Amino acid sequence: MDLATLKAMRPSEYSDAADGYRATSDGAASAKECVENQIIRAMRQALRGEAATAAIQQLRALSEDFHYVQVECGLVATALEAFAYDMEAAKRKLAVALEDAEAAKFTVDSAGTVTYPAGGEKRDGKVPDGGAASGTMDPTVAAINRQAGNFDPNPNYRLAQDIADRITAALQEATDADEKWAPKLRALKADDDLTVSSSDWTDVERDTGGVLKGAADYMESLPHPPAHGTPGDNAEWWKSLTDEQRADYLSVHPAAVGAMNGLPADIRDEANRTVLSEAHGKAALGYEAWLKKHPEPEKYTDYINPMTGTVVKGAQVESQEWLEWQEARANARAPLGGMEAIQTRFDSYPSDDTRPYLLGFDDKNNGRVIVSVGNPDTADNVVTYVPGTGSKLGSIDGDISRAELVQDQAAVMDPAHKTASIMWLGYDAPQDLLGDATDAKYADHAREPLSSFLTAIDTVHHGQVNSTVLGHSYGTLVAGETMRDHPHLPVDNAILVGSPGVGVNHAKDLNIPADHVYAATAKNDLVNLAPPPAGTLAPLNPKAYMRLFDDHSIMYGYDPTSEEFGGRTFKVADGKLPGSDGLMPAHSQYWEGDSLNAMGKIVTGGTP
């Protein structure tokens, strides 16, 4: 870039352009919300049939278009703002160098060459001649020039050479910025079609990485988020940002913003839905690749009479190879199905009080998901459900449904107040009932994340909220350990269902009044078999247990439904016995009948 171009450039024009793209991004976000929250929702409630289904699918595609525009325009805005920042820095350096030249009465030509006058002490009766200095970016040449300046009899030379080098550095900085951002901005150009494909969303992830790398200096200039900040620290940092700075953080750090406890629910939701769309695109492409690599085998094979070992003519059965392929295919698609189950909530909720908010999302390993049914920032009652063994992204639909059932029941119990019901899978849950679930390490790692999340709920409400923790199965241990180790945790009630123990022997050790600790375990829930029968050998992994080997101890401390535990219990059905529908059907039946009714009362501040 030459001197005249840099002098004439107005970085503010690029900032203005960034504002325009932000406005477009906001407009697309509003359009997406309108399509999802009004049009699709109204159609689902009022219309049925193939035509309605097809129309809703088209509207979902339109919503996806708007979401893509929102995210990409946000990235363009950040890129333009960062480009303006880079150019402004180069322009300031040039301006200072030119001011120094003018003050010294030097002249600067269009190439950046600095001409200086005669000056210095006379030699042989003559003042040393003036000359011209040209800047260089070559460190070796610059060192030689500096050395020459030390011996030049005209002191103007040294100053002129310094100014020339600074002009050259400013022009080079501007050139580098131009060359850096031109291809990055071109990369943000979308395909010329109306279909946002899975590959488009994977491109968004790459685009974000490219913009973030290029905008490092600009982002470094903004107020930094607190390192390991409390929810209160995070909230104050977010408040300190301008609208433009918030938009830029959202565009290049969606995962970090989405995971930050203390930020408004709608901001976290917006950030995490971008992360969800990118992960969905990647998972869809991965599933397509899996299908290509694992073609479907023949579904049927001849039936062989087990008595005679001969083929029965005209009879066929599903082949073992096909059955194994089906199971493998289901496993390969499970995370994708989980993401689709989350997305379905955004265009099918019945009322504003049940609008879903995606407060956390990570598809790594078994996945982490936090979904609130209703806005926790404006609710009077907030219940945080912690699921247990076997919970993962691929099966998240069932856990979200449980949160929805609790929210619905709470609305019936207390229609005068709003209730937000949160499904908090913010930890790596154990997956093996007889293996992983006998180890407390999963709960140990979940204590701090859950504590921070619950504290954030209270922070947003300034202490004016009725907060309940609902743990199920291994999730009761997560809840119990968290409450045990955080004496000032802002929780009002605890509900513990199907519990193998909560890490303490008495309700008072959960640091809330014992009469606010409620527990229930169905008669036919196999979790009742957690303690070993009297006289049997200790488990193979005794360090994973907290057994007392008496009539009221279970896997992780006293049974919270026992009198010795000191809390309250509530009525639940006996539950189904193990059978064709699974090994532990009773373990999953707490979200119905008397049990659900009791939980609804507790969550809204009543007693069952």
Image (cartoon, rainbow, N blue to C red):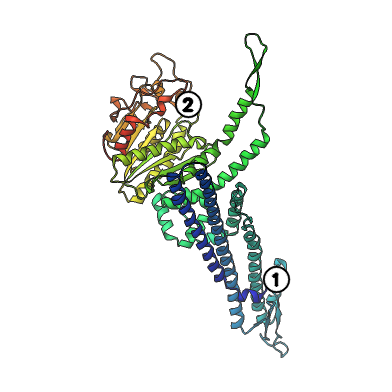
Disc 2 marks which amino acid? Answer: Leu
Image spot of residue 545 (x, y percent): 43, 25
Residue found farthest to the top: 308
Which residue is at a point 67% across and 37% down the rendered structure image? Answer: 292
Report the amino acid beneath label 1. Thr
**Label 1 environment density (alpha carbons within 10 Å; few <14, some 14–19, many ≥20):** some
Label 2 and label 1: CA atoms lie apart by 69 Å
Select label 2 or label 1 by which is in front.
Answer: 2
Tag 1 residue:
136
Place of residue 369 in the rendered image (x, y in percent of width and height, measured from the top left):
47, 41
Q: Which residue is mark 2?
A: 433
- Check disc 2 and report its element: helix, strand or loop: loop
Side of 316 where 522 appears, left or right: left
Q: Residue at x 41, y 22 (%)?
A: 526
Q: Note whether residue 509 is visible.
A: no
- Left or right: residue 578 compared with residue 279: left
